Amino acid sequence: MTTRTVLVINSGSSSIKYQLVDPDSGASLASGLVERIGEPEGAIKHKHGEDVTELTGPVADHGAGLTEVLRLFDEKGPTLTEANIVAVGHRVVQGGKHFSGPALIDDDVVATIERLVPLGPLHNPAHLKGIEVGRKLLSDVPHVAVFDTAFFQDLPEEAARYALNREVADAYEIRRYGAHGTSHQYVSGVVADMLGRNDLKQVVLHLGNGASASAVVGAHAVETSMGLTPLEGLVMGGRTGDIDPAAVFHLTRVAGKSVDEIDHLFNRESGMKGLAGDNDMRAVWARINAGESQAREAMDIYLHRLVKYVGAYTAVMGGLEALTFTAGIGENDANLRAELCERLAYMGMRIDGEANALHSAEARIISTPESTVTVLVVPTNEELAIARQAMTLVQG
């Protein structure tokens, strides 16, 4: 069978992350990152097999960045023609209530993503730049938007709707949209395949600098921790997660802070960074091991929030059969996994210390045979998930 590939683009405000994926085999044929776009000194890294090309210098804008990426594909390989690229898949964080799956990008889809910028102000504008540049430079293949929120479109109304005045909520589209949905859908599907069950009650913990939890029954999400925006839910690298909304009123009235200042405080200067002074969990553990009480307290707050969510989602589903860790922290932080499962031991959860300590890029079970909940570590692969969704849409 002729190889077919999808170029996956994740466009940030000053970066472009990309990967050329074979959706059929799951192989990554090339990948790279354009950083510090618009700054005096930008950087580009392109990887193809064992060959790594690194460039530094000004990258004026997203157009210049992607133009250079396409040149590297031609010069360093694989050329997109030889790779038989059949689609470009774009990650888009916020799809609102409008997209329950991937969407073939046309001017109407672009206009809808643009209209949703107020719901995703940190992400959607950057995605729009990537889409605009991508459609211009790769105009001979279809472009597909894959939305972080799509997996949570069919949340039960009792989970999706806030207890906000109905007219106001509907007028301004305020509801739980979730995020990281592409990851939660991919990981929960891998777990179902590994355990040979399509009716599992499972919790997926996507723990990275951004962190979210989901409750999945069968192939459907029934709860998720992120809400109208990615600010709600778990303690994160720089985000507060759950906080009384009245904190906004208090900081406005008493501290004289503006809405933009509070937005920055809650999204950038809080979470583990605000509690422990560092959003790198390796540094936090080093401080804990050195006896720093604030770092230990920050970790306890982080774990406490996780315990609350796992317990609540277990109650929502009427049981828990699989708990899965994924993303940068979830996949690599054996200490955190051990401490969380110890706190959940009352549920009959038991992990194998040796299996938990193992560093591996493979999906694996880390619980003991007698554990009443199967505990797993499953590396997420959002690029592969985006590629497969794009391929499904364009190939029919």
Image (spheres, rainbow, N blue to C red):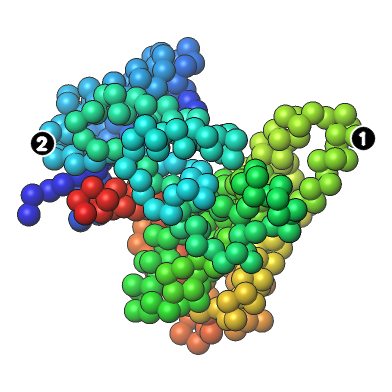
Q: Tags 1 and 2 in contact by the CB under 8 Å rule?
A: no
In the image, residue 359 lies at what x, y percent? 42, 59
In the image, residue 233 lies at what x, y percent? 66, 55
User: Which residue is painted at 46% across and 58% down in the image?
Assistant: 151
In the image, residue 252 lies at what x, y percent? 85, 34
**N-terminal-most mark, 1 or 2:** 2
Q: Which residue is mark 1?
A: 254
Decide: is 47 above or below 60.
Answer: below
Q: Splitting the image into 4 quarters, where does residue 300 fall?
A: bottom right
Amino acid type at circle 2 is Glu
* SS state under label 1: loop
Q: Residues within 10 Å of mark 1 (few under 14, many from 20)?
A: few
User: Which residue is painted at 24% across and 28% down in the image?
Assistant: 138
Of badges 1 and 2, the one in the foreground is 1
User: Which residue is painted at 35% across and 20% down in the image?
Assistant: 63
Q: Splitting the image into 4 quarters, where does residue 277 fall?
A: top right
Indicate left or right for 333 with 272 as reference.
left
Q: Which residue is mark 2?
A: 82
Decide: is 75 above or below 388.
Answer: above
Task: Look at the image and tell me whether residue 316 can be seen.
Answer: yes
Indicate left or right for 168 with 15 as reference.
right
